[in-house]
Image (tube, coloured by chain):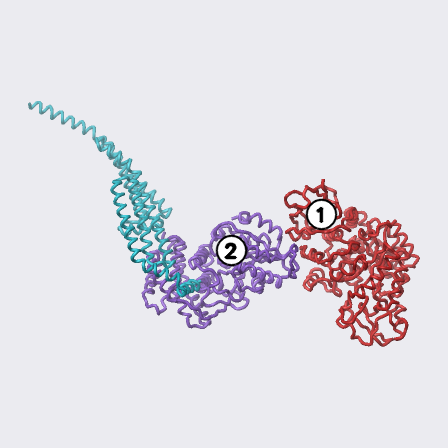
């Protein structure tokens, strides 16, 4: 996709007014009126406090909000036109908005931000999730400074999270990324992150990339591209991440987004992960690498197990086309054991994921169906994980996650084998 | 009398000999045509096999579920089936063309009728094949959606969808061929009605429980909270 | 001759600030004098300026460049005689140039006879002419202006063994304006010069005249009362003369110095100046529009005085801490360039000797509302010498030619009052009047043209201003209007080419005429008016309905 086609004339006109910036902050919004006003103000105060001399702008890439979200973002602008009292600042700060065309907006929003950052010659572009309610001005500093000052290319966040939150990350994305690409990026699919102008320009040049990512979790692809392209990564501890209950949650949709991005990256960066065989390396981190909290939360674990069991039973013919026979047999054994035991071992989980990835690569059936078929299995895995950490300490939770990661690293040859065998087969 | 008989016989013999003489070249022509047909059919088979391998027809039919059907019927792979089909049809056309060359009265008529019928047969086979693909894809989509939406009896839903689409496909294919249209239509109607009735009764009786549960879940705070917790903490 | 008719002449003036000492030496003693200055009046006339502002030339120990006066009724012998001054004044008026002189009323030199008497004893008749105290604890909390040299506003006098009040250097005791004798004497001094024919005074250090316990001792009502008295006498006895206030204050505090048109005619707009430099560096118009928004409306006969640089440091008292740090970092990385709360540099070095920036800044100076002041030498882009102490780096001799002592003096170079700038970039051989006169493209020629265009209309001196706020914040655009005359000004504050859309709907149908080349630009239509500006370019357009 060329730049002309994704930037509307109106946005272009606004970009002309902005001119050149040092820091661009992007907000991919859609009906976020409840939180966005405050978020934009906090971003502004962060920019003013930590980068008082930098040229800055906020870009709201809005997916057709009907609740006045863009207006709340533009209210944070600093200009000399308004009558209202202005905060102390050296410079004008533009807040520009654009309404995105198309149906699936997240990827388009990110592409718009990358393109805008490129056109504005921004040194740093930070993307902040509009749903965040715990944001503080420091977030801006922690995300932006490593790039602004120390020439990093991608800053991913780490959060203080509840152990029950982000299971998809701790049990799937993080281990797979770590095992395959060899970097311990704790949040490989970040909601809040920042990238350098240099890295943005590199992404801008990859047209095919954006065509593929129109609708998936493009954030993960930022991480994958940065690791594969040997760009400089840093993690910054931001603070408490909202509990997931504050966010809209559709598990199938979430898995579709993240897994299609993950599996796509495996195809795209085959050379990067297939040649990487040494142990995974940590990423330089500012602040805590992670923090886990464990306040008691009521969860009906039994239901997860039920959904897992009925899912495996019902989907057996579909799973048979995706998984190898031994793995499927083992899964079937899982659903036949007593509920109280721990059925879904780390190793089985790792093999399952790798076989799904392989089948996705070879497209043995519709790729979307492959991802959907993983959902019940994931639920089974969640059940096991919750059982494991039920009475654990935060340290124990971390140890468990570390163990999962090591298992994934150990089982990596499974994926390579899946890749090779099926390729020769057809 | 003898002479008459001799004359007749010699006439007959002559006639027979003439017809033999007349028939032999035709037979030869027919044999040549059949032989050429075999060569052409064989070539067509080879070319088709190459093309199908190139477009990964096997995987396509595997996706469609046709492969499973073939395996169950102890048939070779779908590429092989297609190739053999083309081989035989092509050769058959040549054989028939050769036969008509023999000039046997009545046979020619049937042969030309058969040749006219051939394209429709092809279309029917194609419809059937596409129907198989659609049925398999849609039933799997329904299965996955049902499982992930936590609907009970996901498999029943999937099978019902597959059955309905297959029935529709068969009826369309048969209509295309045009054999015993009425009989089949009536049979299909009866069958379809029966299936629908069966489903309705099954759901009516078996769904009581589901309906009750659905309503309960909707109105019960506790249940709702449970469901919410489950969904949210899984991300 | 000076046209005598217009009482508001200062509104259309273009002021040239000069120190007699630095301009031209006629007698070869290495110090500029009034005869020399008179010789150079034709240069000033050709430049187009209408008013000369002379810095203090009174007898003085010269410990603060003449701001420490020891006799108000005479001329420092270095600069000539009173007769020399009179003949200079006459010549200037003949050339159509008015003359404003400096009046330092807040304090005298400690060598002034008044102070010498005052310190003798507590019951001396002159004792009450200054502010004395037995302790140094009165007026606590009053800020110290020269923070780099002074520790307290009180100084102990060893002769009278008590403390005297001084807001500036300790050798500059403050006069006591609570004493009616002092106020009478001050008017006598002013009358002396007014009768001689000077056209106005720049009153130095005005906010500090009166002291009161428990206040900041600045901008007190009693101070305003003193000024109103002086103004009333001036209007009564010498109508058409002008008072200009030096009050380095925030715009809201400056407003009162205009009173109801019964205090000063003009006052310097101190906060605007650093913000012009800041806006240029930030490539953002916000500092300028913001400060002008905060600037109060002033009574009709009053006028702001605008300047880019003057004989003092570029003062950063009227900016926020954040802005000050920024200005220091951007304009005075070398600590030697900083003095007190400011930057002691000339215009050209501040602007990296970038001709485009100098043109833009002078364009702003001439087109924003107020009367512009040009500091001597800036019209040719003279440099400074930050190695000289205090503010002497920006007070070096005027560079007239590439010849002996830059054409300033026939004395030996060693005996000049100050070394001439010699470096290859700004030295007199590279930067001098004679060379620039010969080039039509020189800064001097350009400045002459700029002043000419400025003087072609009264709209700049007297018109209203209305800012346009185009989305492109690097473009500062405003409309000046006076009667039927409308001028549109657009400035590109950035170092890159800019496109800007101006909302000129109110002037729909007007034609734009660029004021320097008199060339036509397209008529204003329905759509926003699209302008493109080269780096640091500015346009002045006369809007005409034709």
Give C421 or A207, whichever is nearer the viewer. A207
Give C424 or A201, whichever is nearer the viewer. A201
Residue hosting label 2: A30
Vertical arrangement, residue A390 with respect to residue C362, above or below: below
Q: Secondary structure at mark 2?
A: loop
> Residue under mark 1: which chain is it in?
C
Quadrant of res C216: bottom right
Residue C205 appears in the figure: no
Residue hosting label 1: C488
Q: Which chain is red?
A: C
Quadrant of res A378: bottom left
Q: Which chain is purple?
A: A
Q: Secondary structure at mark 1?
A: strand
Q: Colour of chain B?
A: cyan
- The dot on residue C247 is none
Give C231 or B23, whichever is nearer the viewer. C231
Q: Position of residue C333 (x, y in %)?
A: 70, 62
Mark 2 → mark 1, Cα distance in angstroms: 42 Å
Q: Position of residue C261 (x, y in %)?
A: 80, 57
> Residue under mark 2: which chain is it in?
A
């Amino acid at each position: 996709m060329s730049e002309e086609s994704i930037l509307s004339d109106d946005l272009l006109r606004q970009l002309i007014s902005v001119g050149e910036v040092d820091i661009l902050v992007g907000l991919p919004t859609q009906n976020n009126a409840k939180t966005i006003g405050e978020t934009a103000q906090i971003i502004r105060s962060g920019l003013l406090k930590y980068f008082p001399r930098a040229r800055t702008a906020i870009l709201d890439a809005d997916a057709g909000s009907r609740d006045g979200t863009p207006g709340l973002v533009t209210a944070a602008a600093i200009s000399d036109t308004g009558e209202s009292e202005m905060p102390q600042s050296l410079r004008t700060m533009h807040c520009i908005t654009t309404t995105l065309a198309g149906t699936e907006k997240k990827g388009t929003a990110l592409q718009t931000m990358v393109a805008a950052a490129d056109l504005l010659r921004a040194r740093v572009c930070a993307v902040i999730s509009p749903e965040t309610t715990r944001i503080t001005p420091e977030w801006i500093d922690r995300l932006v400074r490593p790039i602004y000052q120390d020439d990093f290319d991608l800053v991913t966040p780490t959060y203080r999270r509840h152990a029950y939150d982000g299971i998809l990350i701790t049990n799937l994305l993080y281990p797979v990324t770590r095992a395959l690409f060899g970097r311990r990026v704790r949040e490989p699919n970040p909601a809040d992150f920042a990238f350098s102008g240099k890295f943005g320009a590199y992404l801008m040049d990859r047209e095919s990339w954006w065509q593929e990512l129109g609708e998936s979790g493009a954030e993960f692809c930022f991480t994958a591209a940065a690791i594969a392209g040997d760009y400089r990564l840093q993690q910054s501890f931001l603070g408490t991440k909202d509990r997931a209950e504050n966010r809209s949650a559709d598990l199938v949709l979430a898995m579709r987004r993240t897994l299609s991005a993950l599996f796509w990256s495996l195809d795209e960066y085959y050379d990067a992960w297939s040649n990487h065989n040494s142990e995974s390396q940590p990423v330089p981190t500012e602040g805590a690498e992670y923090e886990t909290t464990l306040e008691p939360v009521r969860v009906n674990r039994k239901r997860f197990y039920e959904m897992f069991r009925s899912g495996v039973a019902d989907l057996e013919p579909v799973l048979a086309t995706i998984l190898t026979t031994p793995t499927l047999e083992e899964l079937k054994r899982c659903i036949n054991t007593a509920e109280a035991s721990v059925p879904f071992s780390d190793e089985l989980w790792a093999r399952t994921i790798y076989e799904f990835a392989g089948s996705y690569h070879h497209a043995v059936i519709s790729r979307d169906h492959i991802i959907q078929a993983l959902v019940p299995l994931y639920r089974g895995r969640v059940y096991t994980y919750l059982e494991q950490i039920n009475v654990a300490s935060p340290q124990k939770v971390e140890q468990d996650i570390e163990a999962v990661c090591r298992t994934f690293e150990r089982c990596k040859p499974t994926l390579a084998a899946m890749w090779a065998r099926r390729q020769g087969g057809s | 009398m003898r002479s008459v008989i001799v004359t007749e016989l010699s006439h007959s013999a002559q006639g027979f000999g003439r017809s033999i003489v007349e028939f032999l070249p035709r037979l030869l022509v027919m044999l040549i045509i059949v032989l050429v047909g075999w060569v052409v059919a064989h070539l067509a088979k080879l070319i088709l096999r190459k093309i199908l391998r190139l477009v990964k027809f096997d995987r396509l039919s595997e996706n469609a579920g046709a492969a499973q059907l073939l395996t169950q019927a102890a048939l070779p792979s779908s590429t092989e089936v297609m190739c053999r089909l083309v081989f035989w049809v092509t050769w058959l056309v040549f054989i028939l063309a050769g036969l008509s060359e023999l000039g046997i009265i009545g046979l020619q008529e049937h042969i030309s009728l058969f040749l006219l019928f051939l394209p429709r047969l092809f279309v029917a086979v194609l419809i059937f094949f596409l129907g198989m693909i659609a049925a398999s894809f849609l039933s799997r989509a329904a299965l996955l959606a049902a499982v992930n939406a936590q609907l009970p009896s996901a498999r029943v839903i999937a099978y019902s969808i597959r059955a309905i689409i297959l029935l529709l496909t068969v009826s369309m294919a048969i209509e295309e061929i045009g054999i015993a249209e009425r009989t089949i239509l009536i049979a299909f109607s009866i069958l379809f009605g029966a299936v629908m009735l069966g489903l309705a009764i099954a759901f009516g009786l078996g769904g009581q429980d589901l309906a009750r549960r659905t309503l309960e879940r909707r109105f019960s705070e506790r249940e709702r909270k449970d469901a919410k917790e489950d969904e949210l903490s899984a991300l | 001759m000076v046209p005598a008719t217009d009482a508001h002449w200062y509104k259309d003036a273009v002021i040239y600030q000069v120190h007699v000492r630095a301009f031209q030496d006629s007698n070869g003693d290495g110090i500029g004098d009034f005869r020399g200055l008179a010789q150079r009046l034709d240069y000033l006339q050709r430049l187009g300026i209408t008013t000369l502002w002379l810095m203090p030339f009174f007898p003085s120990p010269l410990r603060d460049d003449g701001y420490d006066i020891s006799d108000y009724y005479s001329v420092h012998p270095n600069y000539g005689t009173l007769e020399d001054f009179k003949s200079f004044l006459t010549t200037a008026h003949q050339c159509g140039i008015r003359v404003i002189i400096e009046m330092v009323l807040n304090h005298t030199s400690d060598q002034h006879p008044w102070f010498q008497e005052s310190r003798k004893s507590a019951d001396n008749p002159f004792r009450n002419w200054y502010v004395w105290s037995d302790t140094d604890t009165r007026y606590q909390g009053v800020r110290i202006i020269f923070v780099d040299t002074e520790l307290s506003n009180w100084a102990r006098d060893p002769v009278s063994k008590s403390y005297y009040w001084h807001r500036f250097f300790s050798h500059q005791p403050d006069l006591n304006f609570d004493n009616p004798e002092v106020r009478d004497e001050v008017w006598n001094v002013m009358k002396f010069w007014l009768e001689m024919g000077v056209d106005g005074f720049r009153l130095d250090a005005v906010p500090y005249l009166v002291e009161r316990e428990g206040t900041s001792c600045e901008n007190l009502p009693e101070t305003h009362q003193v000024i109103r008295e002086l103004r009333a006498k001036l209007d009564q006895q010498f109508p058409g003369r002008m008072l200009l206030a030096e009050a380095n204050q925030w715009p809201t505090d400056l407003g009162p110095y205009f009173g109801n048109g019964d205090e000063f005619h003009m006052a310097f707009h101190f906060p605007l100046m650093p913000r012009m430099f800041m806006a240029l560096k930030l490539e953002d118009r916000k500092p300028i529009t913001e400060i002008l928004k905060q600037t109060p409306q002033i009574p009709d006969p009053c006028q702001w005085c605008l300047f880019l640089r003057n004989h003092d440091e570029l003062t950063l008292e009227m900016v926020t801490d954040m802005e000050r740090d920024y200005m220091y970092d951007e304009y005075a990385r070398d600590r030697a360039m900083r003095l007190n709360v400011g930057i002691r540099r000339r215009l050209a070095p501040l602007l990296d000797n970038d001709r485009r920036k100098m043109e833009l800044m002078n364009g702003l100076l001439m087109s924003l509302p107020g009367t512009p002041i040009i500091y001597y030498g800036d019209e040719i882009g003279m440099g400074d010498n930050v190695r000289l102490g205090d503010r002497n780096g920006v007070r070096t001799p005027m560079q007239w030619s590439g010849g002996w002592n830059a054409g300033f003096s026939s004395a030996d170079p060693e005996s000049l009052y100050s070394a001439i700038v010699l470096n290859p970039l700004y030295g007199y051989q590279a930067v001098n009047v004679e060379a620039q006169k010969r080039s039509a493209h020189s800064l001097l020629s350009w400045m002459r043209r700029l002043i000419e265009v400025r003087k072609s209309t009264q709209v700049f001196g007297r018109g209203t201003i209305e800012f346009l706020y185009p989305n492109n914040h690097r473009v500062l655009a405003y409309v000046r209007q006076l009667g039927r005359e409308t001028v549109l000004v657009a400035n590109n504050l950035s170092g890159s080419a800019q496109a800007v859309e101006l909302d000129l709907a109110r002037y729909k149908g007007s034609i734009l005429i660029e004021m320097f080349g008199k060339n036509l630009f397209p008529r204003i239509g329905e759509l926003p008016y699209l302008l493109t500006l080269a780096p640091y370019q500015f346009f002045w357009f006369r809007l005409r309905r034709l």
